[in-house]
Amino acid sequence: RVALPQSPIPPVPRPPSHAFSSCQAPPRRIPILIAHKLSPFARTTTPFSIAGVSKKKSLGRLHGFKDASQGNLFFYLATIASVKRPLALILENVKNLVSHDKGRTWGTIKATLEEMEYKVFHKVIDARDYVPQHRERIFIVCFDRRVFGDAIPFQFPAPPEGVKPKLADILSNDSPAKYTLSDHLWQYLRDYADRHKEKGNGFGFGLANVDGVTRTLSARY
């Protein structure tokens, strides 16, 4: 471990209304974090995803940076980066991060990283080029301009050439029974979907083509 001078943590730009979540580690613990040159960060996606925002709106809850329990973790990560000063950062989040709040959310994130003197590259990448799932995510790669300067010859790698993976490539023919819907449960779900469709509700299900890819797999909000 590396002990740093007990000096004030450098300020990180953030919206005036910002308040860290209750799960934040006390600032005094930051100096004992392990020193590193590369920091991969994966932030909570629910406050920014299309499904997450829709769900929160339907429940009358705040989303984006205004979500006090999940939406402001970026600024905590920025504080860590400003203290530990890794040479490079890799961040990942949902595609909707770019367009959330009419682009203002992404604008704030990018401006914060640039004010910390990082050169920022970003690209939305679809997982279907690598696995049989349509899952678009934004990847943000940053390099310390104090070390590398502004002329950084970075490019996101092109996806693999050739035939794309399909669902049949990964499915097993001898999976345990507990991973297969029983005939009774399958019929129940179909009937349940039909009842909601008659009422005009949105509940339903989708079937994936084994010769294609699945839609984005997600947890329940």
Image (cartoon, helix red, strand yellow):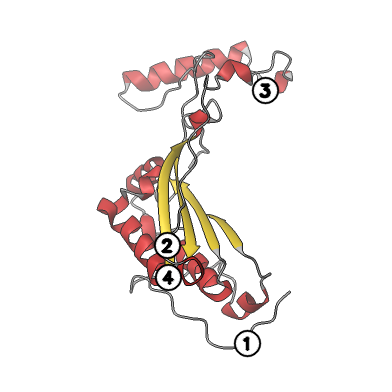
Give the mark toward the camera: 2 or 3.
Answer: 2
Which callout, 2 or 3, points at the residue further toward the start of the chain? 2
Closer mark to the observer between disc 1 and disc 4: 4
**Circle 2 is placed at which residue position?**
119
CA separation in Å, label 2 and label 4? 7 Å
Q: Which mark is residue 5?
A: 1
Residue 69 visible from this viewpoint: no
Gap in angstroms between the C-alphas marked 2 and 3: 45 Å
Q: Name the amino acid, label 4.
A: Glu
| Contact, mark 3 vs mark 1 (Cβ under 8 Å) | no
Question: Secondary structure beneath disc 2?
Answer: strand
Vertical side of 133 occupied by 109: above or below: below
| Label 4 SS | loop
Q: CA–CA distance between discs 1 and 2?
A: 27 Å
The residue that label 4 is drawn on is 117
Query: Quick one: SS at disc 3?
Result: helix
> Neighbour class for label 2 at 10 Å: few (<14), some, many (≥20)?
many
